Structure formats: structure tokens, C-alpha cells
Image (spheres, rainbow, N blue to C red):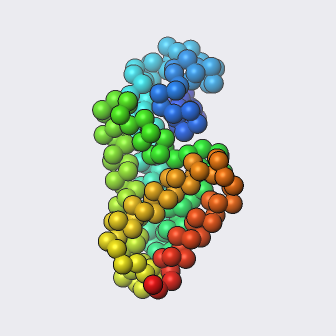
């Protein structure tokens, strides 16, 4: 892994562990074992680094969507859940949830990239739901976009709430979403 990639990876970790505003280049330099000047060489400003982290997640999302596009709607929904499963297993929250908390205090260019990431997630889940409804796999009576927002907000919240409750609640919420979608109302 290059120095640039290592910096992005560590920044991603710190954002999802502490929050965007709670880490500094000094924290990064200590964690990675390089000088602040090396970080500034790759990322002159913190917003440059924040954008790089968001772009890493955008690329990962695009790759996941492409990899799973030919699967059934239920398997695609499970692929969406895998984003949160991975975050939960690493005892982290998702990037959207972490940056949304700091939204009003992060730079406008980071906000813009974050909105693109959130839109991409929303579009994907909406597409999964529409496909599932068309194939008779999913049953729900509200607009697909609204249902997608409910599912996404449940997943965003549960990775944070299990810090306070039980880890089993994560699987219970996923199972409840699937049960609700797959059982006619």
C-alpha cells in the first residue's frame, strides 16, 4: 500500500472512530509513523483528505454495485447490508453516518462529495426495492425511495445503537427489514 493509500485508510478509520473534527494530521502522523509534512504533501488540506476518503467509499460502492448487479433483489439487499456488517464487525460506524454528524462543521467541498455518496447509496437501495417489487419478491405500499430511506436510516442507526445495546440487535434489525419486505402485508 502506498503512503497516500495508508493515509486515506487511517483517516477513514479515525473519522469513523472519533469523527471528522476530532482528529488531526498529528493524530495521523502518530498512527502511521510519518511526519506531518508527508501528510501535507499528499493532502495539503484536511478537506482534500476528507474528499479522498469519501471518494474511496464511492469507488467501493460502485464496485460492489457492479459486482452484485446480476443477483436477485434479496441478494443485492444483503450486499447493501454487508457495508454495515463490515463496519459493525470492525466496531465502527459507516462513513455517511460519521460525516453526517459533523455535516455543518465540515468544509463545503467535503459536504458536496458526501451528498454524492449518500445519493448513490439511496439510488442503489431504491433500485433494489423497485426491482424486488417488480419481481414480486418485496412487498411494501409506500414509495420505493421513502422505503429506501427507512431502510438506510435503520442501518445507519443500528451500527451506532449497538454500542449501547446488544450486538444481537444488529442481526435482529436486518432480519426484521427482510421479513417486512418479503411478507405480503
Q: Is residue 81 visible?
A: yes
Measuring from the top left, give residue 21's x and y in whole percent: 47, 27
Percent position of residue 54, x then y: 42, 41
- The residue drawn where x is 47% and y is 50% is 60
State how many labels appear. Answer: 0
Q: Residue at x 56, y 14 (%)?
A: 35
- Nearest to the observer: residue 53 or residue 172: 172
Q: Quadrant of residue 42?
A: top left
Q: Quadrant of the C terminus?
A: bottom left
Where, quadrant-wise, is the N terminus in this rendering?
Answer: top right
Where residue 4 sits in the image (x, y, percent)?
A: 50, 29
5 is higher (above) or lower (below) than 174: above
Q: Residue 170: percent from the left, percent from the top?
A: 62, 59
- Does residue 67 appear left or right of residue 89 in this picture? left
Task: Note whether 113 is above or below 42 in the view shown.
Answer: below
Instruction: Find residue 91 and report its image quarter.
Output: top right
Residue 127 visible from this viewpoint: no
**Residue at the location (42% across, 63% down)?**
150
For the point 69% across and 60% down, which residue is it? 168
Give 146 or 133, whichever is nearer the viewer: 146
Report whether 132 appears left or right of 179: left
Amino acid at each position: 500500500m502506498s503512503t497516500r493509500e495508508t493515509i486515506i485508510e487511517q483517516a477513514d478509520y479515525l473519522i469513523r472512530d472519533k469523527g471528522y473534527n476530532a482528529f488531526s494530521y498529528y493524530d495521523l502522523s502518530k498512527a502511521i509513523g510519518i511526519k506531518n509534512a508527508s501528510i501535507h504533501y499528499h493532502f495539503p488540506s484536511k478537506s482534500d483528505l476528507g474528499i479522498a476518503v469519501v471518494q474511496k467509499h464511492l469507488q467501493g460502492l460502485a464496485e460492489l454495485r457492479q459486482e452484485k448487479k446480476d443477483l436477485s433483489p434479496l441478494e443485492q439487499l444483503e450486499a447493501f447490508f454487508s457495508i454495515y456488517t463490515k463496519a459493525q464487525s470492525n466496531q465502527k460506524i459507516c462513513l455517511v453516518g460519521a460525516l453526517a454528524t459533523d455535516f455543518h462543521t465540515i468544509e463545503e467541498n467535503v459536504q458536496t462529495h458526501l451528498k454524492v455518496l449518500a445519493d448513490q447509496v439511496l439510488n442503489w437501495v431504491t433500485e433494489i426495492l423497485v426491482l424486488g417489487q417488480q419481481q414480486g419478491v418485496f412487498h411494501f405500499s409506500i414509495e420505493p425511495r421513502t422505503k429506501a430511506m427507512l431502510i438506510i436510516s435503520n442501518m445507519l442507526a443500528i451500527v451506532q445503537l449497538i454500542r449501547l445495546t446488544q450486538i444481537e440487535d444488529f442481526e435482529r434489525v436486518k432480519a426484521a427489514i427482510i421479513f417486512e419486505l418479503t411478507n405480503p402485508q
